[in-house]
């Protein structure tokens, strides 16, 4: 792997997760992002109560992301080989935490609407 290009990274992710699962995750991420943008535009502000609940879900998202990657790649934590592997897993945990917070905030805004004030 002499050159690190976008297409190389794309091929590596398709190889790790499988083509179908990888593209399903990409589509899910795009849909959640679009829904989040829609909620922000619709509400014209951030609800701090929803934001706090979304932040409380972040540790669960971090653990779920690491568990998901370990399950899909058929690996174990004992297979970590060095500092780079730990950095990659910390990145996976961070991405899972942020993604879960965005998902929870968006789901609360779309599905748990409070009744209008009189």
Image: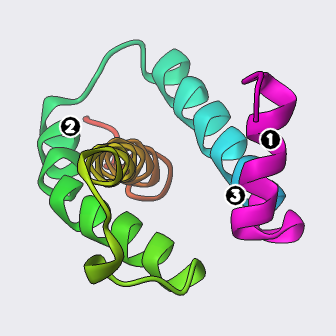
- Within 10 Å of disc 3 (Cα), the crowding (few <14, some 14-19, many 20+) is few
For image coordinates 53% across by 22% down, the residue present is 42
The residue under label 3 is: 25
Q: Nearer the viewer, mark 1 or mark 3?
A: 1
Picture coordinates of residue 8 (x, y %)? 81, 35
Question: Viewer-proximal residue, 1 or 116?
Answer: 1
Q: Give how far apart the Cα atoms at labels 1 and 3 are.
A: 13 Å
Element type at mark 2:
helix
The magenta stretch spans which residues? 1-22
Q: Give how far apart the Cα atoms at labels 2 and 3 are.
A: 24 Å
Picture coordinates of residue 60 (x, y %)? 22, 67
Element type at mark 1:
helix
Question: Viewer-proximal residue, 107 or 115?
Answer: 107
Q: Point out the image quarter for the N terminus.
A: top right
Asked if residue 56 is among those painted magenta in the image, a careful observer would answer no
For image coordinates 14% across by 30% down, the residue present is 48
Asked if 17 appears above or below 22 in the picture, the reply is below
Asked if 90 appears above or below 68 in the picture, the reply is above
The residue under label 1 is: 10
Picture coordinates of residue 26 (x, y %)? 73, 48
């Amino acid at each position: 792997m002499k050159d690190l290009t976008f297409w190389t990274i794309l091929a590596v992710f398709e190889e790790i997760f499988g083509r179908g699962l990888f593209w399903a995750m990409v589509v899910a991420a795009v849909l959640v992002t679009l829904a989040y943008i829609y909620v922000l535009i619709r509400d014209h502000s951030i609800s701090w109560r929803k934001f706090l609940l979304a932040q409380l879900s972040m540790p669960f998202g971090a653990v779920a992301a690491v568990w998901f990657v370990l399950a899909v790649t058929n690996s174990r934590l004992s297979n970590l080989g060095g500092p780079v592997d730990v950095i990659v897993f910390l990145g996976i945990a961070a991405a899972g935490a942020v993604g879960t917070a965005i998902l929870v905030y968006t789901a609360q805004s779309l599905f748990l609407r409070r009744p209008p004030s009189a």
